[in-house]
Amino acid sequence: MDEFHEFATDGFGRFLAAARKFNVGLVLAQQRLETLAPRLREAILGALGHMILFRQGASASFGALPPLVWPRFGERDLLGLSSYNAVTRVVGEDGTPRISRLTVPRPPAGGTQAAHHVRLLTRVQVAEARSDVEREILERLGSTPRLGRETQHETGQNDP
């Protein structure tokens, strides 16, 4: 879940507390811990198994991260990571965390042209017309779509 703070609730924190015993795995992507409610932040940090930390900015919640990768890495390491580099903590089968450095491959060259190509391919492969999606949602809800103005006029129906 990317930017999960937008829809995470208090119930999500309770779910995290129980998820591991049911072998549930989640990937949570979040840029800033301070956007999370304090109780939710504590639940997440307490339930972490594996994590990847890219360069961090100093913030009110930053202090919670260095202890997770200590003694191998400290505050200065997290603040000074260069682009495409990260610090990882992976918990092994025996429960022991293994802390290391990770280099992420740079995106392929192509800039905006590559991004345009990805958007075009995505539209061709998975996009549907908005009107079709809205009609399907209304059908699933057991509702009928409102008639357009032209159709209302032709059928003699008035706007409520």
Image (cartoon, grey):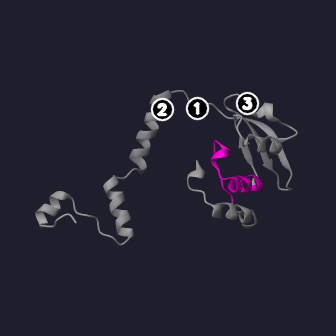
Query: What span is colored magenta in the figure?
Result: 25-47
Mark 2, Cα crowd under 10 Å, few <14 / some 14-19 / many 20+, is: few
**Residue 55: x %, y % from top left:** 70, 34
Closer to us: 37 or 43: 37
Q: Amino acid at mark 1?
A: Pro
Residue at which label 2 appears? 114
Q: Is residue 69 above or below residue 109?
A: below
Evaluate if marks 1 and 2 touch, with contact meaning CB atoms under 8 Å apart.
yes
Distance from Cα at disc 1 to Cα at disc 3: 18 Å
Residue 45 colored in magenta in the image = yes
Q: Earlier in the sequence, mark 2 or mark 3?
A: 3
Which of pointers 1 and 3 lies earlier in the amino acid sequence? 3
Residue 140 appears at what percent x and percent y?
Answer: 39, 69
Residue lying at 65% horizontally and 50% vertically, measured from the top left: 36
The residue shown at (66%, 45%) is: 34
Looking at the rendered structure, which numbered label has been put on residue 81? Answer: 3
The residue that mark 1 highlights is 107
Q: Residues within 10 Å of mark 3 (few under 14, many from 20)?
A: some
Q: Is residue 33 magenta?
A: yes
